[in-house]
Amino acid sequence: MATTADEGTNGKETNGSDQEEVAVEVEPKTGVSFPVKLDDGKQLNCVGVRKKSMLGLGIKIYGFGMYADNEKLKALLKSKIGKAPEKLNKELYQLVIDSDVEMVVRLVIVFSSLTMSMVRKNFGEGLGASIKKLTGGKKNDELANKLMGEASDNIKLTPGSVIEISRLPGYVLETKVMGDVISKVESELLCRAIINLYLGDDPLDKDAKDKFGMSLISLF
């Protein structure tokens, strides 16, 4: 189980002597640390791991953390559902997938042989399948490939490299690789498809989805 590293000074990371110390949560299967809060106030709602089957082995590709503007999520949930549901349900996740609430998925690479073309292919396939689920079977590979489409193969990914995918107001999806913006796409469907990858019926990490759901219930 992931633990929040804010117990004792050893569990905290600092960004410099003049800045407040930020607690982190460690994704246990990869050892990747995620700050529990981003500079803009978005809060960490779950951590997880993306595994891919290669040669019959479950290879860990990246650890991820999902952040959200929890105040806006809380307002959305209370306006649509009212009181806290007794258990996790599809409606809860669907509200988040379909909403325009700002979210960030931070991916930290752990697989040492990962290339940008592999990332592009992986996301193209994953988003393509996610779009088909959301549209009742309609393919839109052109849209699916826009997320990583402009990322150069010259970008060298090493363990610890960070990719951030942000859902911004107005259904804009922005992707950064190591701090550089590589795409900014205005598309409600693409915004829904990326969150659906993590919170939909066939999530990349079921435990992470459940943790996100429990954090939603706690907002009530």
Image: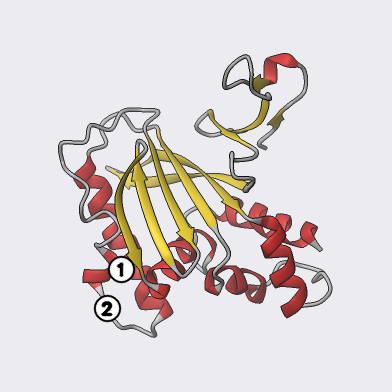
Quarter assignment of residue 178: top left
Q: Is residue 161 left or right of residue 14?
A: left
Q: Nearer the viewer, residue 205 or 55?
A: 205
Q: Which mark is residue 139?
A: 2
- Which comes sooner in the sequence, label 2 or label 1? 1
Q: Secondary structure at mark 1?
A: helix
Name the spot of residue 22 as percent of width and height, x first: 66, 28
**Is 55 rendered above or below residue 95?**
above
Name the spot of residue 139 as percent of width and height, x first: 27, 78
Q: Secondary structure at mark 2?
A: loop
Measure the alpha-carbon separation of dots 2 and 1.
Answer: 7 Å
Q: How many marks do you count on the picture?
A: 2
Name the spot of residue 74 as percent of width and height, x first: 73, 64
**Is 89 rendered above or below residue 21?**
below
Q: Are marks 2 and 1 in contact (CB under 8 Å)?
A: yes
Residue bearing the label numbered 1: 128
**Is 96 rendered above or below residue 152?**
below
